[in-house]
Amino acid sequence: MPRKARQPPTPRRSPLDARLTEGIRQLGLEPAPEQIEKFLRYIKLLQQWARRINLTTILEPEAIIERHFCDSLALWSALKSLEPTQPTPPERGHLLDIGAGAGFPGVPLKIMAPSMGLTLLEPRQKRAAFLQVLIATLGCSQSQVVTTRLTELAGVATGRYDWIVARGVGQLDELVEEAVGHLAPQGAFAFYLSGRQPTGTLRRLSGFDATDYRYALPFSSVEHRLLILRQR
């Protein structure tokens, strides 16, 4: 009898690969192998650049996965659970990340929604340089870095955005006031908040419906919040 052809061994996943995959799955998302590979390259690049410039104090790979990647992806997780009352991820829309810093949350959101347009707004030159290298290294199409402040955005970039996101940036009332003119009709804001951050003023914002979404990160019981403001 002819011998059966030997099948190549299945590549063993590293513990970091497995933890990243499990963390994203706990958010209700299913990452493709090429998306996992991009996240792993992101970790390496972040660690390399963080030795030279102040990007983040969180440099352990497991902590980056939980506190940066999974936290960023909580928006897509929230929208899956809130549909149809909330807008779906802008697969063919455009997202603006205000004060993008090391790329959170915009770049992880882009990795999981690759056809989405992405603008990373970062006024600090060194961080903007990192973001330029990051989106080139990860092959993020339809992505750009704009090195300016929100108040000056109209002078250097045109168009409106389906989603405007911010994570740990400034006073929310002021941010909405400055950003609302850049929001597309029926667009939405998403603000990543600390557990006790007050939102009363924003929840009463005229012309918007507000959802205060609370979640725990994978591998953690600490509560986090997303305030989603959807334009009527």
Image (cartoon, grey):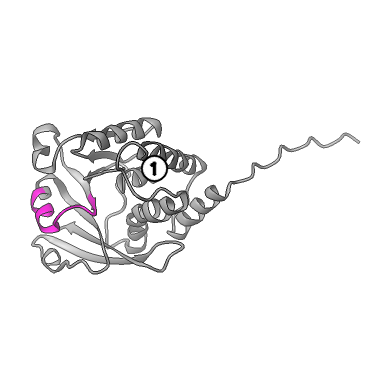
Residue 175 magenta-highlighted:
yes
Q: Secondary structure at mark 1?
A: helix
Can you give x and y, in whole percent of width and height, for residue 80 in the image? 36, 59
For residue 104, above or below residue 208: above
Q: Is residue 202 left or right of residue 100?
A: left
For residue 40, above or below residue 176: above
Q: Residue at x 32, y 58 (%)?
A: 79
Q: Which residue position holds label 1? A: 111
Q: Is residue 197 left or right of residue 136?
A: left
For residue 4, above or below residue 208: above
| Residue type marked 1 | Ile
Within 10 angstroms of label 1, few (less than 14), some, or many (20 or more) residues? many
Can you give x and y, in whole percent of width and height, for residue 6 in the image? 78, 36
- Image quarter hosting the C terminus: bottom left
Can you give x and y, in whole percent of width and height, for residue 144 in the image? 26, 33
Residue 115 vs residue 129, the one in the foreground: 129
Magenta span of residues: 165-178
Q: Residue at x 29, y 47 (%)?
A: 90
